[in-house]
Amino acid sequence: MVATTIESKEYVLVTGGAGYIGSHTVVELLEKGLNVVIVDNLSNSSQESMKRVSKITGRDDIIFYELDICDKDALSNVFSKHNITSVIHFAGLKSVSESISKPLEYFRVNVTGTCVLLDCMKAAGCNNIVFSSSATVYGHPKTMPIFEDHDLAPINPYGRSKYMAEIVIQDFCNANPSMNAALLRYFNPIGAHPSGLIGEDPNGVPNNLLPYITQVLCGKLTHLNVFGTDYDTRDGTGVRDFIHVVDLAQGHLAALSHLQGATPGCVVFNMGTGSGFSVKEIIQTMEQESGLEVKHVFKPRRAGDAAEVVANASKAMNEMKWTAKLSLSDMCQSAWKWQKQNPNGYPKFHKAQSLVGLLDQ
């Protein structure tokens, strides 16, 4: 039998790298001179984002495979071709509302997909993984701000799938002492790359606040519903910890560096600013940055919504030397620039269309 020769160049594998946070993280990796392999099934992302990442970075050596994270044979083939030393794992389904109607699909992709990935990593001797988790694992917060040791009690299938994936990774690290993992619990990523070339491109009506607002501003949606004006907050509307997607992307590089340091193992970090902004404050800042009115209607509270959800992000600062730097104005300005330049999101191509210069099939 002839042995397969793996190239000596080292790569970071980015699962779900064509998506919103994934594409911004790929930009940061490439601009640091790292080599990247992307796997993505394009179910909720676009191959156009990778063309634009190449334009932003001036790198035309992105390697892309269109595959499902649950396809073990296809994923194993990627590891067999490339010297992958680290993984950033974004691939997964991410809609809270959809998870309620399709729980099995969320557990299949988010939990089973993680198991398949870890299995492939172990076989290839790849020992570093940064996992895209979520603050939804905390459920209804009992204390504020939220520390990493807060009780984990997710209240929907999406949050439970992230929680279960965390447990899988923690147990895998316990069984394999050479394995290092960083579980990053995101709060509310918003904004876009300052170029306006890549940004959040939701399928259908947005589930998240900022893309909903920008679509109201550009006339795609008639108005924003603001649920609850009588919370015990500074202006009566709900408060959330919003973080610029570029800050979050840079946090993944800090996590990779941390895993290669003197304290290997499985670590958990909140990824937020440590400050909260209210819905009214988001609206006002978007109006200032766009020069337009955000038409909105006040509605009663929704059942289950918390008044305030804010991270304590001091652990990431102390241990990874990472902190969010960009302001709410930066977040809103970049999101509006993205929306203005791309009123309908990325151009919609047939899924089978090739990505010239970026594919290695």
Image: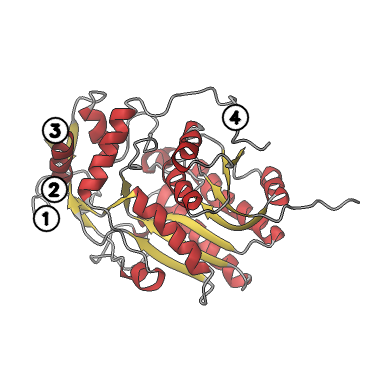
Does label 4 or label 1 sit earlier along the sequence?
1
Q: Counting other residues with Cα less than 10 Å from the Cα at mark 2, is it few (<14), some (14-19), or many (20 or more)? A: many
Q: Amino acid at mark 3?
A: Gly
Q: Give the distance between the C-alpha atoms of the residues marked 4 and 1, in whole angstroms.
A: 51 Å
Mark 2 or mark 4, earlier in chain: 2
Query: Can you say which quadrant of the picture contains the C terminus?
Result: top right
Q: Which residue is mark 2?
A: 237
Q: Are marks 2 and 1 in contact (CB under 8 Å)?
A: yes
- Residue 291: give its label: 3
Element assignment for label 3:
loop
Which residue does the image show at 14% across and 37% down from the upper left? 287
Label 4, secondary structure: give it. Answer: loop
Q: Nearer the viewer, residue 173 or 329?
A: 329
Mark 1 — residue?
A: 233
Where, by quadrant of the figure, is residue 217 drawn?
top left
- CB atoms at circles 2 and 3 under 8 Å apart? no
Sequence-first tag of 2 and 3: 2
Q: Secondary structure at mark 2?
A: loop
Circle 4 sits on which residue? 356
Question: Is 62 situated left or right of 98 in this image?
Answer: right
Q: Between tags 2 and 3, which lies in front?
A: 3
**Cα distance in 3D space between marks 2 and 4:** 47 Å
Spatial CA span between label 1 and label 3: 26 Å
Q: Position of residue 279 (x, y in %)?
A: 17, 45
